Amino acid sequence: MRHIVNSTILAAMTLASTLNCAAQTVGQENAPVDPQIAAALQQISAKQIRADVEKLASFGTRSTLSAQDPASIAAGHGIGAAREWIKSEFERYSKECGGCLEVKTDTFTEAPADRIPKATEITNVYAVLKGTDSESAKRIMLVTGHYDSRNSDTLDVAGDAPGASDDASGTAVSLECARVLSKMKFPGTIIFLTVAGEEQGLNGSRHFAKMAKEQGWKFEAVLNNDIVGGDKNPEQDHATVRVFSEGLPAAATEQEIRRIRAMGGESDSGSRQVARYIAEVGRTYDTGVKPLLVFRTDRYLRGGDHSAFNGEGFSAVRFTEFREDFHHQHQNVRVENGVEYGDLAKFVDFDYVAHVARLNAATLASLASAPAPPGNVHLLVKDLENDSTLTWEASPGAAGYEVLWRVTSSPEWEHVEKVGGVTRVTLKVSKDNVIFAVRSVDREGHRSLAVVPTPER
Ligand SMILES: [Zn+2]
């Protein structure tokens, strides 16, 4: 059911009737399909993803602590060989698009730590599809997966660790998004990243996120894919992928936490707006998989690379298959009491990984096509009144703006009001009863992330 509230109707609406609409779970209109994005999604190939995952699983182990000397690389064994292969794939895609991708490495030496017995060189490999518009190109969408793997013992550098689902699947999502989206052009920048060191302590992503912060890179959304193999156990839901997002931002200051506490902003972090955006993209495009938004940072006892980005103040979410089979991750390859252990490619559902890659690609492409979110969005709270006035700064490239709102107990936006090219609007809806946000929209209907206002006295 769709529901767009226009100004005339809205002006006549009482608060009671507005809340009544919400109580009936009235949905907002989904973004229109961009035919070019829809065509690109068709290019995402389960066959290619299968080849990627099987290749990554073929290096024996991709333990961050495993071999990376020239002889091992030449022999196709260890993390060094995996790294060189990923780099050559990005370079191949770049060649196919006339050099449109800048393929780079981020290498550093990690000092000894709990899971790193001696100083170890760690390399992240990434490809940059630079935005076509010099101003918009500063806005960066990032997709990432970790190419390192582990078996039962995280310090075992020699034993097999195929890591097909954890996380060759996520690495394949980054690769496949790069292969397909590099054939398109976007005003915003997209970075396709694969990191190492995840299993030793998120070392690769921590280094990359820190470097990005120091260099002033503006990540609008970070999509981390970790364990998206769609394990073929009988209880798997192959039509659903979980999207985890933090509530209270890990990097929030004391002052920000106080404001969140006072206003009930626990479910409106930047990461959560990314999650809601993914849910909307999942309704607009037929990707084959539906996102299940999980409103917590990660699963119990587990962590992932998105947290490293959250720690530096970036909006980042994690995609993970609906149901994990713990016999098939972080386990030595073996059969014990008739149970097959190990993260083998044969347990991966490659169609499922392709569906998840489509959802990622649709999200990256939609955001990179959209205008920047409106700046400095404020909600005026200096007077006691039942109307709500919002102000914001214009976004270059926006044809207009939309104000969104939902009752405070609802997980997703319920109402949208198209307000045109203005930067100030007063609505007959009480700010005391709802949560507002504003987003930018261009002429083709590409929507930015929603920005929740800060109160202004
Ligand atoms: Zn993992």
Image (tube, grey):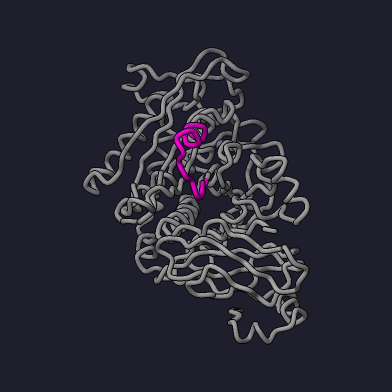
| Residue 21 appears in the rendering | yes
Q: Hey, which quadrant is residue 403 in on the image?
A: bottom right
Q: Look at 66% across and 44% down and name the residue there.
A: 249
Q: Residue 234's x, y, as percent?
A: 63, 52
Residue 15 in the magenta stretch? The answer is no
Q: Look at 55% across and 43% down and name the residue there.
A: 314
Q: Which of 184 and 171 is in front in this view?
A: 184
Q: Residue 223's x, y, as percent?
A: 51, 47
Q: Hey, which quadrant is residue 419 in on the image?
A: bottom right
* Quadrant placement of the N terminus: bottom right
Q: Residue 56's x, y, as percent?
A: 42, 35
* Quadrant placement of the C terminus: bottom right
**Furthest residue in direction left, as rendered:** 98
Q: Look at 21% across and 47% down and name the residue there.
A: 98
Ligand 1 shows up in the quarter that is: top right
The residue range painted magenta reads 208-223
Q: Which of 265 and 147 is in front in this view?
A: 265
Query: From what the image shows, is residue 171 above or below residue 360?
Result: above
Q: Residue 421's x, y, as percent?
A: 47, 72
Query: From what the image shows, is residue 327 above or below residue 266?
Result: above
Answer left or right for 82 relative to 94.
right
Query: From what the image shows, is residue 136 above or below residue 436?
Result: above
Answer left or right for 353 relative to 237.
left
Query: From what the image shows, is residue 199 above or below residue 50?
Result: above
